[in-house]
Image (spheres, rainbow, N blue to C red):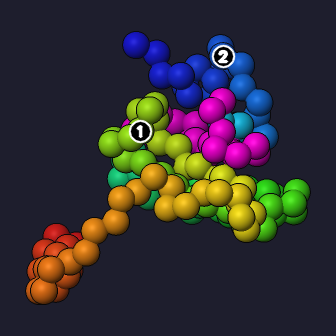
Amino acid sequence: MTCVFCAIIAGESEAHVVLDEPAVMAFLDTRPVFKGHVLLVPREHHATLPDLPAEQRDGFLEAAQRLCAAVVELGAQGSFVAINNTVSQSVPHLHLHVVPRTKGDGLRGFFWPRVKYADGEAEEHAARLRSVL
């Protein structure tokens, strides 16, 4: 099965491209949270952020910074930036969302339920993460 984002990068599928550079491409999301919602992708196919080679990280993040600044320059008060890795990732090609935000835009919590740690649980989770890192 062909990757939708690889097809856009190859010019085989249409997209509203906003950034076209040797290592990255960005285009409007076809199902935006708000108008101006952009997806940033590496040109090379990598499924998730952990798969992105180290030598591509800085360029990818620098492009994300420029996109965040661009949506503000065009009238947003800020932006929401997100990457899903596998779960909730509708296309299995690394993509970073830049969603323009304004105060009172109605976006609250971005669909995430919230939980609380029981006594001692936060310390346990932090220790387990430190051990893996």
Q: Is residue 32 above or below residue 105?
A: above
Q: Which residues are magenta?
A: 30-47
Residue 72 numbered mark, or none: none
Return the residue at label 1: 89
Is 46 within the magenta?
yes
Q: Amino acid at mark 1?
A: Gln
In the picture, which quadrant includes the C terminus? Answer: bottom left
Residue 132 location (% of width, % of height): 16, 70
Distance Cα–Cα, label 2 vs label 1: 19 Å
Residue at 39% from the left image edge and 41% from the top image edge: 88
Q: Is residue 98 visible?
A: yes
Count neighbours of disc 1 (C-alpha within 10 A) and say few if under 14, some if 14 to 19, many if 20 or more.
some
83 sits to left or right of 16 = left
Residue 71 location (% of width, % of height): 79, 57
Q: Is residue 104 above or below residue 29?
A: below
In the picture, which quadrant includes the N terminus? Answer: top left
Residue 10 location (% of width, % of height): 63, 21
> What predominant SS class does the magenta segment belong to?
loop
Count neighbours of disc 2 (C-alpha within 10 A) and say few if under 14, some if 14 to 19, many if 20 or more.
few
Q: Is residue 53 visible?
A: no
117 sits to left or right of 104 = left
102 sits to left or right of 2 = right
Q: Earlier in the sequence, mark 2 or mark 1?
A: 2
Q: Quadrant of residue 90?
A: top left
Residue at 56% from the left image edge and 28% from the top image edge: 5
Q: Amino acid at mark 2?
A: Ser
